[in-house]
């Protein structure tokens, strides 16, 4: 196939941007962002990634390099034409690539991000700062952009042109070497991006860590000059002492496509049996794709400075998928394929060591800076807890790192802290699980524990119900849900003992009989409660059954056909229950107590956040009883 010649005018196709892109572009064109200069960082970052990609592909297909293996990025300012261009000899893009990469946003988390946009310019730009708009940021400074690109290994080049206003054009083009040229026609107010000093400063500030030379070409009095602006070596091979915090931060932005500050920077070289360098970061904010079901780790693998893949499941476990950064191995072969990485013994060793190192660094932070650690935990605790479930080997270590809300402490608490506060004679660590921190805090099942000063951990992440299955005890103390089984609160203190020693009265027995007759099979059992002080009733799971909240989660995911029948507990000290008990010993009590029995059960269901079994009947009964009460 030959390129189109000048005589034969290339056919131009017009395409509309994907709706999400149009929205972003609209914001870019009318941007009020103060850091417009970041567009250059984005272009250089993409150019560097493109070089990494072709270098990797060339490991198995040398022809792709076309005799041109000196990678470079060129930034060229042309004051006469008022254009700024960024060129690379990376992987390049063909027609389909241009359409999918520069016409849509395929990144996961995009729709979640779009939903957060409010229409308020300032707020939205702030969000965009966190999400990163990559290439599209060029429309903050340019009113027309031309991309000319030729994919490595293909002969036909393509051009992509747009003014950022809803459409772009694609046409066949001519280009000698592989790679991409991006030409920005700068807006009236963007002349600063033609000034050599300004460009130098921007490149130094944001892109010094880029491992490929960045050449700045400018028109001077003595004609065109070209100057290498950046260091041009991979940041992670430089000694720590020579890297500033800002340089780490910029590298983090580049490698993670993130725009927050790193919460933790981990940079070290492992030497010995296997050698590798790690430069990894814990973000300050939750990345958009954190709860993607795919749970893809985002750490990049390099071999001897050559990028291999950013889709490497084997570098860190899924529960550390919030980590960003690179591992550069000295031992793996350069031509290793992504498939060969799976179950590779070197990879397994690296994964093990890196995982241990990350956890031990987190431990240090947790001890030395508990407040900062609490912020980390709010963001990534729910993910790290997946490890308690799935990483048997490190379960104890992860349990020590875990923090919880609790009825016994302000802020977050650890299991060890809970144990240190346990009352004399208390052998059990109590917890409750539920949908939200507010809801669990107000659960009726906590009342007795609160009144006796027994601490209960408040757990409200969906993952909690799962790891709890794997952890019967901590530090020799059993973990027990307060919504399951009978609450043996008696032996926690003397006062309690006396209170619980009260014999069950014939009235209470009669009431339980009447309730059983009215509720039938709907409940598994009815018994006087030792865990209620204020509420009249509550539901609990029977000793041998699954915890109620876990049943609900499983049912919501179609993993459980039906919930098992629950135990209804009644509070013998509650006025309503006492009144009902007095009626229960009389004639025809079952009928007399019918509506009240059904209402009691519905109340208990509502407190569990569930709907009454028959909402209409519930409303009618309630109306009847209200009418009586108001008379
Ligand atoms: N110079 C280039 N060479 C080859 N492909 C490129 C180049 N610039 C962009 N691309 C392609 O376009 C895609 C979109 O780029 P864009 O900068 O919008 O997003 P990104 O780099 O994937 O993520 P981010 O928005 O976080 O920067 C890239 O993933 C890449 O596939």
Image: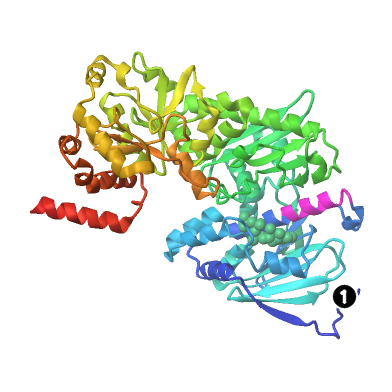
Q: Identify the element where label 1 is drawn.
A: loop
Dot 1 alpha-carbon crowd within 10 angstroms: few under 14, some 14 to 19, many 20 or more: some
For the N terminus, the image quarter is: bottom right
Image quadrant in which the C terminus is located: bottom left
Q: Residue at x 26, y 44 (%)?
A: 597
Chain part drawn in magenta = 48-60
Give whichever of 565, 200 is nearer the camera.
Answer: 565
Report the residue marked by disc 1: 3
Q: Is residue 622 left or right of residue 454?
A: left
The residue sitting at the left extreme is 631
In the picture, measured across the screen, residue 573 lies left or right of residue 220, that is left
Q: Give the residue at x 32% y 22%.
A: 489
Res 621 visible: yes
| Image spot of residue 141 (x, y percent) | 58, 67
Judge by depth and name the residue closer to the eye, 67 or 396: 396
Q: For residue 276, what is the image quadrant?
A: top right
Q: Where is residue 360 drawn, in percent x and y?
A: 59, 26
In the displayed image of the protein, which residue is found farthest to the front? 587
Q: Nearer the viewer, residue 46 or 56?
A: 56
């Amino acid at each position: 196939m030959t390129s189109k010649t000048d005589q034969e005018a290339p056919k131009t196709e017009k395409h509309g941007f994907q709706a999400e892109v149009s929205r972003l572009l609209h914001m870019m064109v009318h941007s009020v962002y103060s850091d417009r200069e970041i567009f250059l960082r984005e272009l250089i970052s993409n150019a560097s990634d493109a070089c990494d990609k072709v270098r990797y592909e060339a490991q198995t297909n040398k022809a792709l390099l076309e005799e041109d293996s000196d990678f470079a990025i060129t930034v060229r300012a042309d004051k006469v034409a008022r254009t700024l261009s960024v060129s690379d000899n990376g992987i390049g893009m063909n027609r389909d690539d241009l359409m999918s990469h520069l016409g849509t946003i395929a990144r996961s988390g995009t729709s979640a991000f779009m939903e957060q946009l409010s229409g308020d310019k300032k707020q939205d730009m702030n969000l965009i700062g966190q999400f990163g708009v990559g290439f599209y940021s060029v429309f903050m400074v340019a009113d027309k952009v031309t991309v000319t690109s030729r994919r490595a290994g293909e002969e036909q080049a393509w051009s992509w042109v747009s003014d950022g206003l809803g459409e772009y054009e694609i046409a066949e083009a001519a280009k000698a070497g592989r790679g991409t040229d991006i030409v920005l026609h700068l807006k009236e107010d963007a002349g600063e991006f033609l000034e050599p000093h300004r460009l130098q400063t921007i490149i130094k500030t944001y892109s010094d860590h880029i491992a490929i030379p960045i050449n700045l070409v400018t028109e001077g009095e003595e004609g065109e000059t070209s100057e290498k602006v950046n260091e041009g070596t991979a940041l992670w091979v430089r000694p720590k002492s020579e890297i500033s915090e800002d340089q780490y931060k910029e590298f983090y932005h580049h490698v993670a496509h993130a725009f927050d500050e790193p919460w933790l920077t981990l940079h070290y070289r492992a030497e010995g049996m296997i050698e590798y360098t790690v430069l990894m970061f814990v973000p300050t904010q939750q990345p958009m794709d954190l709860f993607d079901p795919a749970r893809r780790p985002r750490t990049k693998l390099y071999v001897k400075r050559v990028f291999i893949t950013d889709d490497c499941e084997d570098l860190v476990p899924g529960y550390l998928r919030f980590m960003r950064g690179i591992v550069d191995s000295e031992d793996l072969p350069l031509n290793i394929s992504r498939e060969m990485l799976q179950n590779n013994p070197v990879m397994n060793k690296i994964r093990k060591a890196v995982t241990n190192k990350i956890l031990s660094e987190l431990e240090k932070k947790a001890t030395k800076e508990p407040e900062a650690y609490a912020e980390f935990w709010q963001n990534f605790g729910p993910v790290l807890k997946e490890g308690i479930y799935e990483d048997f080997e490190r379960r104890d270590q992860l349990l020590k790192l875990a923090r919880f809300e609790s009825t016994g402490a302000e802020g977050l608490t650890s299991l060890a802290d809970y144990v240190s506060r346990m009352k004399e004679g208390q052998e059990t660590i109590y917890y409750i699980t539920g949908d939200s921190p507010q809801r669990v805090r107000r659960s009726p099942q906590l009342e007795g524990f609160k009144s006796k000063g027994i601490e209960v951990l408040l757990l409200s992440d969906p993952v909690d119900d799962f790891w709890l299955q794997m952890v019967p005890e901590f530090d020799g103390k059993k973990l027990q849900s307060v919504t399951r089984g009978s609450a043996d609160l008696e032996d926690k203190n003397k006062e309690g003992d006396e209170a619980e020693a009260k014999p069950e009265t014939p009235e209470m027995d009669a009431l339980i009989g009447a309730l059983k007759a009215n509720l039938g099979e709907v409940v598994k059992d009815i018994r006087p409660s030792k865990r209620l002080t204020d509420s009249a009733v509550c539901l609990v799971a029977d000793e041998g059954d699954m915890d109620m909240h876990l049943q609900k989660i499983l049912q919501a995911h179609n993993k459980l056909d039906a919930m098992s029948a629950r135990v209804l507990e009644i509070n013998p000290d509650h006025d309503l229950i006492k009144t009902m008990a007095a009626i229960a010993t009389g004639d025809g009590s079952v009928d007399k107590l019918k509506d009240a029995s059904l209402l009691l059960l519905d109340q208990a269901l509502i407190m569990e956040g569930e709907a009454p079994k028959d909402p209409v009947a519930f409303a009618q009964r309630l109306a009847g009883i209200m009418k009586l009460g108001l008379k």
